[in-house]
Image: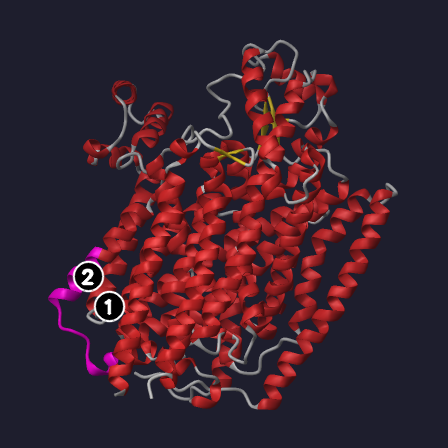
Amino acid sequence: MTVEATGHHWRRTRRLVWLGLLLWLLVVVAAPLAVNQLNLLRAGGFPLGFYVAAQGAAVLATAVTFLLVRRQETIDRDGDGGSLH
Amino acid sequence: MQPEGDSRPSEDESGALSESPALSLAIFIVGFAAGISILVILDQMGLMRTATTRVLVVLPFLVALAVAWPARARRHDVFLADKCGVSAGINGAAMAAAAVSATLLMAGSGAMFSTGHDGLPVVTGLIGGFMLMALLLAPYLARSGALTIAEFLGHRFGGAMRTMAALVIAALAFIVLAVQLSALSFLVGLATPLSGLPAVAAIAFALLLCVLAGGMRTFTWTGAVLVLLVVVALLVAGGTLGWRTSQNPLAPLAYGQALRDIADLELSLIGRKLADGASLKRHAVAYLSSDALNAVGAALGFMASVAAMPHVLGRSFAARAAREARASAAGAMLLVLLIVVTLPALAAFGKLAFLKLVAAGTELDALPAWIYEYGRADLVKVCGASATAADAVAAACKSAPGFKGLLRAQDLAIDPSAFLLVLPSLAGLPQFFSGSMAAAVVAAALSVTIASAVVLSGALSSDLAGRIIKGDSSANRQLVLARVMASAAMLAAASLVATRAADFALLATWVVPLAAATLFPALVLGIWWRRSNAPGAIAGMLAGGGIVLYYLVATRYAPVAFFEQWFGFSNAGMSAVMKYQSLRAAAEAAAPENAAALAAVEAQARLIANWWGIRPAAAGLFGLPVGFAVHVAVALITPRPGSDTQSFIDRLRDPRRSKPPSAS
C-alpha cells in the first residue's frame, strides 16, 4: 500500500512539474520573445513588449511559482498518508 | 553508498547558534539604521562628502565581521551546509544573496543602460532560474541529506561522478570567488585610499576570517543582512528617481514616462546631429545590439546556471525538509524579483539623464564635475580619451570626427559596468546615493565571495581530499580540513586578483554557460529520470562542458583556426569574409611573422568565428542540449542503475521525509 501511495503521489508530482515547465516556457522564455508584436500595444504608459521583458514576465513567473509550490505542498500532505487511510 | 540519516545538533547547541546571531543581528540593524540617519544628516549639511562614501563602503565588511563570531561553526556539516536549522525565510534571503552578485548589479544594469531592451535577458534569466530550482531541484536535494552538490551526485551516480563533479564545482567556484574578489578590490580602491595589493590583502584577510569562523553558517547571516541592504539601497534610489520624474516612488511602475521621454529625445538628438543613428541604440527597440537567438540563449544559460550554481543551489542543504527548501527558493525568488525589476527602471532613469545632458547642448568647458571625478578612475571617456582633466578632453575632442563644440551622445562613454556607481551623479542625486550604490555592490560581492569560498572549501575537503586521506576521518578532522582548504582557496584567489593574471570580466561571462552545461543536466536527470546512470552522467557532463569550453576558448584565443575549421557554420556576411580573406592574403604576402598584419587577421576572425552567430554568453544553447542528449544516449546503451541507487531515488521522492525532524 505504501508503494502504491508513493506511486500515486509521484504521478501527481510529475504532472504538476510538467505543468510548471509548460508555464515556465510560456512565461519566461516565449513571452519576452514576442517583444516586437507586444510593443504595438501599450500598458500603463509602457510599450508592452519591453515591459514584459523587464518586469511582467518576472512578476508573473514569481506568482506562478508560489501557486505551484502551494499545490505541491497539498500533494505532499496527501501523499504523507493523511488522506489515504 | 547511502548517506547517514540527518544528523541533527543537540538542542542546546542549535539554540546557542541560532539565538546569538539573531540577537547580534538585531543590535546590528538598530546600529545600522542609526548610523545611516547620522550619515544622511551630515550629508545634507554638506559635510563628509567622501567620508560618507568610505563609511558606506566599509559598512558591509563590518556587518560580515560582526556576524562571523556569533555564527561560528563547531561541526563540519554546519560549516559546509549550515545543518543546524535555519528558518526558510532566512535561508531564502541567503539564497538570494548568493544569486545577486556584484557582476549582476554592475554588468547587468550596465547592459540595460547601454543597450536598453537587449540587456534584459538577465531579468528573466534569474527569475526563470529560481523557478526551475524550486520546481525541479531544491526540494529533492534537501531530502537527500547530502552536504554538497558533489556528494549528492555521488550518492546518485557513484564515486567517479563525485570526483568529477567536485573538480568542476571547484573550478566554477574558484572563478566566481576570483571575479567577486576583483570587483571588491576595484570598489574599495575607488572609495578609499587603499588600492592594489594592500587592498586585496586586507579584503581577503577580512573575508577569510568570516569564512573560517562559520563557513556556510556565517554566510547565512551575512547574506541575509547584506541582501536586504542591496534591496533597500536599490529601492530607495529607484524610489527617489521615480518620485522626481513622475511622483511615483514605485520605480518599476514609474519609468513609463521616462521611456517615452527617452524615445522622443533619441529622435530629436539624431535630428539635431547630437547623436548618430548607428551608435545610439534606441532604448526600447528590441534586437539592435543582439538578436532573438542570442537573447534566448543568454536567458537559458542564466536560468540553468542560477538553478544549478553550487553556492546558490547548495543552500537547499540547509533546509530541514523539502517543504522548507521550496519555501526558501520561492522566498529567494521574491527578493531577487525586487532587485531585478528595479534595475531596468534605474537604467531608464540613467539613460534619460544622459540624453538630457546631451540635449542641453553642453559645451566642453561646462562639463559637470562628476565626469572628471569618474574619468580619473578611467570609468568615463569623452571623445575616446579618459576624462582626467579639461585639457585632455579638449585635445581628444579636437581630433574627433565631426565635433563642433557641443558634446554629442557618441562623445560621452560611461563604462557600462560602472553605470550603477555613476548613476547617482549622472541623475543629480545627493552624494549619499553614490555611497549607498557602492555599498550595495560591495555587499553583493562580499556575500558571493564568502559563499563561493565555502563551496570551494567543501569540494576540496569533503569531496576530494577527505576521501583520499585514509584513516581517521572524524568530524573534527573534517572541519579542520575544510578550514585549511578555505584558506588555500582564498589565498589562491587573492594572488590571482592581486597580480591581475586573468581577464575577470571575461571569466564572469564564461562561468554562466559552463555551470549550466555541466551541472544542470546531471542534476535534473539524476532526480527525474530513474534510468539515468553513472556512464550517462559522466559522459553528459564531459560533452556539455567540453563543447562550451571549446567554443569559448577557441573563438577567443584561436579565432583564425576556429573560423577556418567551421567556415560553413559562421554567420559572417559576404563583405566580412572578403575583408578577412584580403587581410589574410596581406599577412601572407608581408614579411614572415608580421605581428601587426597577423593581429589584424585575428581581430577580423574574432568577429566572424562563431556557430550561427551565437555569442559566448549564449553558449548554453549548445551546452545544454548536448549535455542532456549525450547523458540520455549513453545511459540508454549502458546498464540500468543498481538497487542501491533505486532506493536512493525512492528516498528523494518519498514525501514522508518532508515531515518535521521527529519523523526520522
Residue B380 pos. (x, y %): 62, 31
Give above or below for B157 relative to B295: below
Horizontal side, residue B455 vs residue B526: left or right: right
Q: Quadrant of residue B654?
A: bottom left
Res B632 label: 2
Q: Main secondary structure of the magenta part?
A: helix
Chain of the residue under label 1: B
Q: Quadrant of residue B27?
A: bottom right
Contact check, label 2 and label 1, Cβ < 8 Å: yes
Q: How is the image coloured?
A: secondary structure
Name the residue rendered at 35%, 44% in the picture: A30
Q: Determine whether, in the image, residue B171 is placed left or right of residue B73.
A: left
Q: Secondary structure at mark 2?
A: helix
Q: Rate crowding at label 2 as few (under 14), some (14 to 19) or many (20 or more) other CA atoms within 10 Å.
A: many
| Magenta-tinted stretch | B629-646
Give the residue type that dot 2 points to. Val
Q: Which residue is mark 1?
A: B529
Q: Can you see residue B306?
A: no
Q: Between residues B239 and B142, which one lies in front from this camera angle?
A: B239
Where residue B633 appears, as percent x and y from the top left, is 16, 60
